[in-house]
Image (spheres, helix red, strand yellow):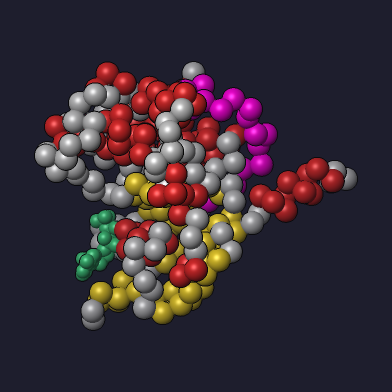
Amino acid sequence: MISDANTAQGAVCHDSVIELDHVSFAYQEQKVISDFSFAIRERDFVGVIGSNGAGKTTLLRMMVGLLQPTEGQIRLFGEPIRRFRDWERIGYVPQKNAFNPLFPATVREVVMSGLYNNKKLFRRIGREEQRKCDDALEVMRISEIQHKRIGQLSGGQQQRVFLARALVNKPDLLVLDEPTVGIDAQTQADFFELIFHMHAHHHMTFLMVSHDISMIEDQLGQEPREQCGAIKFYVRHSHEQDCAIPDLQHSLV
Ligand SMILES: Nc1ncnc2c1ncn2[C@@H]1O[C@H](COP(=O)(O)OP(=O)(O)OP(=O)(O)O)[C@@H](O)[C@H]1O
């Protein structure tokens, strides 16, 4: 028999996070996505695999509101995307980030900025915020360079800063476009351990483009659930127990 608690949790955890309804997209004459429908539910981990130019980044950019579909509808957390305002619920780390070498902010300031949306920008930064920031810096192994200017770091170091910034606020949905390109093997392994733990135990939903098919199959299963042209979607859903420890670092040990 299913207990009331399970039923309640099941209902909550199956709310839809992203819905694509007959979505198409073209750059001028070039059609990239054709009549694609797909739903991502709360606590899904969706891995996206596909050859270069298949349209993965285009699809992600539509899902986070940076491109408009040529046809079809997108809903985020149940709202039509044009009416959606809760952008702080979504963390997005694009494929290629690069800060201008003259950009004046430090690593710590960039990570800290992940904690604020526009409304909260001028609030005092409290001890709790500082602690969350320390935690994210530690997890991405960038504590030692936290006072350096972001523009002066290598590409891999900058990518770690972007990941720390996306993780610091623990968004409900984290969208990652080839997040570990250019990152050393140890930090990469730690990062995957961290996000798969967060998926299983911290009620987060993930959408991640990767070229690492063996890692995706190991973590999400051998068979894609859905296909859009040359793009395949691997999905694992979590019903595991939530974990009460709030820090990011505990999932690395
Ligand atoms: N801004 C743009 N203007 C015109 N065409 C574009 C633009 N961005 C992408 N394209 C084209 O759309 C197609 C899909 O590109 P997209 O970047 O979405 O692919 P991808 O699957 O993310 O590729 P990769 O694995 O190389 O990152 C490609 O043929 C690309 O040349």
Residue at 31% x, 50% y is: 94
Above or below, 146 against 62 in this view is above
Where residue 114 appears, as percent x and y from the top left, is 39, 40
Residue at 64% x, 27% y is: 244
User: 161 and 132: which one is in front?
Assistant: 132
Where residue 239 appears, as percent x and y from the top left, is 66, 42
Residue at 66% x, 54% y is: 14
Above or below, 226 against 24 in this view is above
Where residue 82 appears, as percent x and y from the top left, is 46, 70
Q: Which residues are magenta?
A: 235-251
Q: Quadrant of ligand 1?
A: bottom left
User: Is residue 236 one of those drawn in magenta?
Assistant: yes
User: 16 and 109: which one is in front?
Assistant: 109
37 sits to left or right of 185: right
User: 159 and 84: which one is in front?
Assistant: 84
Asked which quadrant contains residue 216, the reply is top left
Instruction: Confirm whether residue 195 shows in the render.
Output: yes
User: 210 and 63: which one is in front?
Assistant: 63
Instruction: Confirm whether residue 226 shows in the render.
Output: no
205 sits to left or right of 232: right
Residue at 58% x, 36% y is: 202
Where residue 217 appears, as percent x and y from the top left, is 46, 44
- Examine the residues drawn in magenta and state their main secondary structure: loop
41 sits to left or right of 7: left
Q: How many marks?
A: 0
Above or below, 88 against 147 in this view is below
